[in-house]
Image: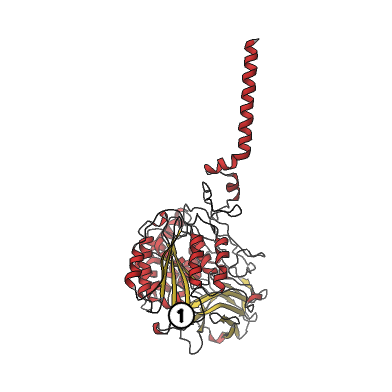
């Protein structure tokens, strides 16, 4: 009996211990699971990665959305964010209603569905914001130079086309001039390519407004590679060398915390600036959101209609610490400063965990531009050769609306600009944000069109823009007549032929449904005949020759490129 009594006592104690354990798990289980990176809450919030580019080779209705707002409803397309591992634990400063951006385990991009071919009788208007970003092309060049092919989701056609210079006529008056041209398509029999080219006015160095720069540099541990922080330091020095003596530079860094390294300092004090830049080292976490808010706060003190106040972020895009952890939180924190006239340049660096999606979105919302620096040569191109365009905006909220004549055009398709689409009804709504054009910038857009009927007018192009700091926009109107179309592609300018080669290559490599039977050999032949003595075009031709071989091999082996 004593034995059974002892067993009963032991069983009672065991049951009591188990009850305590169950209660503890109920109260603290989620935190315990978070410590091991397996939070049910984190796993439940993960989004499915988007690989590949959906599309329908047949006719579709085009998507209408407001530029820069990915939360719009309707039939606009927003690709899911890539999957990333859940963070082990949130930092103490994290609010419960805000999750951090995922720590990247690879390069992340935001996929866009290629524009469909639209019937003119159903919708004769095409409206978009201009884009002068070039990050997508620089990423492509690096990936090809390293022996690979670009990820489909990283290809933004407009950024490839606008990477290159085009010899458009300079504006005779006003901020820009529009160049229209059309010729038979080399890719699709029976269709034409229509080029819309904008040329911004140039500004001499002596005519530039006083510039106040705030360099915001990521010095976290992920920036330790030679193609990240050391390249960022080189880029900043090149930019300082191109500034006027009246310009100022401030330096802010972020890693585990934010640090004011240097207050606004005259650009003429090269020694002080270079010493501060050289002193930077990498290590720690990534409080990008906090750093961005600090940099904007500094820049806002110098903002005004008679000066340029710009934040220049140099980073690989990772963020995992601080108050403003998500892209939405970052954008919300800087919105007031943007309205005060502070502009933004995002400079991407490195590979392996590059947040291309975040960098482009910040630049879009920050009224600025997005670049990717893969070499000292590219740093020199962005920060010296094209410094005026990088720094000084000559026209803001620039919108383009092309109206196709149903009597002449059966249908059309805009190559690229998917994430720059604007609802047709918002073209004259001056409260809707759009793109900016810097001094000397060119902006090129290509349409694939199918002619029909005997109408005389092909398209009417309207451009609407504000002066920097302005509230009301001015509008210009241009027309392309059917009689003005070239009879053959050979008659077209080198500008049109080269832009067609670049856009065609991009469309093929990203798997656009309308480009399913297009040929890289055709694109190569076009580029070869349109180099026009320009070194950047010659470089593209060399890259394309490598791409043709690798793409053919990938297709033959059935391996998705």
| Quadrant showing the N terminus | top right
Q: Which residue is mark 1?
A: 439
Please say which color scheme the image uses.
secondary structure
- Residue 341 seen in the current view: yes
Q: How many marks?
A: 1
Give whichever of 222, 322 is nearer the camera.
322
Front-most of residues 90 and 474: 90
How crowded is the residue under tag 1: few (<14 C-alpha within 10 Å), some, or many (20+)? Answer: many
Work out whether residue 531 can be spotted: no
The image position of residue 96, as x and y in percent, is 60, 52
| Residue at 34% in and 69% down | 272
Q: Dot 1 lies on which element?
A: loop
Name the one closer to the observer, 407 or 180: 180
Residue placed furthest toward the top: 1
- Viewer-proximal residue among 117 and 92: 92
Q: Is residue 126 above or below residue 556?
A: below
Query: Is residue 133 shown left or right of residue 546?
Result: right
Query: From the viewer's perspective, is residue 310 above or below residue 29?
Result: below
Rendering coords of residue 125 (x, y %): 63, 76
Return the residue found at the far bottom: 172
Q: Kindly indicate the quadrant of the structure image that contains residue 336.
A: bottom right
Residue 502 locus on image (x, y percent): 45, 71
Q: Position of residue 299 (x, y in %)?
A: 48, 71
């Amino acid at each position: 009996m004593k034995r059974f009594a002892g067993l009963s006592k032991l069983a009672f104690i065991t049951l009591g211990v188990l009850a305590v354990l169950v209660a503890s798990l109920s109260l603290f289980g989620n935190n315990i699971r978070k410590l091991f990176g397996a939070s049910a809450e984190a796993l439940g919030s993960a989004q499915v990665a988007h690989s590949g580019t959906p599309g329908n080779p047949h006719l579709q209705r085009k998507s209408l959305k407001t530029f820069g707002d990915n939360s719009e409803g309707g039939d606009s397309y927003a690709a899911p964010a890539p999957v990333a591992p859940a963070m082990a634990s949130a930092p103490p400063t994290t609010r419960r209603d805000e999750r951090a951006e995922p720590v990247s385990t690879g390069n992340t991009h935001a996929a866009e569905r290629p524009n469909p071919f639209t019937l003119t009788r159903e919708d004769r208007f095409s409206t978009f914001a201009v884009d002068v970003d070039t990050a997508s092309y620089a990423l492509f060049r690096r990936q090809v130079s390293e022996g690979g092919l670009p990820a489909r989701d990283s290809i933004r056609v407009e950024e490839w086309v606008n990477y290159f210079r085009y010899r458009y006529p300079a504006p005779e008056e006003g901020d820009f001039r529009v160049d229209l041209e059309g010729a038979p398509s080399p890719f699709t029999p029976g269709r034409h390519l229509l080029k819309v080219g904008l040329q911004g006015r140039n500004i001499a160095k002596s005519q530039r407004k006083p510039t106040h720069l705030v360099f915001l540099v990521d010095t976290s541990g992920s920036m330790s590679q030679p193609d990240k922080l050391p390249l960022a330091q080189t880029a900043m020095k090149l930019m300082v060398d191109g500034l006027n003596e009246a310009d100022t530079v401030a330096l802010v860094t972020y890693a585990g915390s934010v640090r004011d390294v240097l207050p606004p300092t005259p650009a003429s004090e090269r020694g002080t600036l270079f010493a501060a830049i050289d002193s930077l080292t990498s290590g720690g976490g990534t409080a990008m959101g906090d750093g961005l808010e600090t940099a904007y706060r500094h820049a806002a003190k110098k903002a005004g209609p008679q000066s340029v106040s710009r934040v220049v972020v140099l980073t690989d895009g990772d963020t995992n610490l601080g108050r403003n952890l998500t892209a939405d939180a970052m954008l919300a924190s800087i919105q007031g400063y943007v309205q005060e006239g502070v502009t933004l340049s995002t400079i991407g660096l490195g590979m392996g965990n590059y947040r291309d999606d975040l960098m482009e979105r910040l630049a879009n919302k920050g009224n600025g531009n997005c670049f990717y620096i893969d070499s000292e040569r590219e740093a020199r191109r962005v920060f010296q050769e094209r410094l005026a365009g990088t720094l000084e905006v000559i026209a803001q909220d620039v919108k383009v609306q092309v109206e196709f004549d149903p009597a002449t055009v059966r249908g059309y398709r805009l190559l690229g600009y998917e994430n720059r689409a604007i609802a047709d009804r918002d073209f004259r709504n001056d409260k809707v944000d759009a793109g900016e054009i810097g001094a000397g910038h060119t902006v090129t857009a290509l349409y694939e069109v199918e002619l029909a009927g005997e109408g005389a007018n092909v398209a009417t192009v309207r451009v609407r823009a504000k002066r920097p700091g302005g509230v009301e926009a001015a509008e210009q109107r241009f027309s392309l007549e059917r009689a003005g179309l070239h009879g053959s592609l050979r008659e077209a300018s080198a500008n049109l032929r080269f832009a067609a080669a670049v856009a065609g290559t991009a469309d093929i490599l990203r798997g656009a449904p309308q480009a399913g039977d297009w040929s890289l050999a055709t694109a190569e032949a076009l580029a070869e005949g349109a180099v026009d003595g320009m070194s950047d075009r010659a470089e593209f031709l060399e890259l394309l020759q490598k791409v043709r071989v690798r793409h053919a091999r990938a297709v033959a082996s059935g391996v998705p490129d």
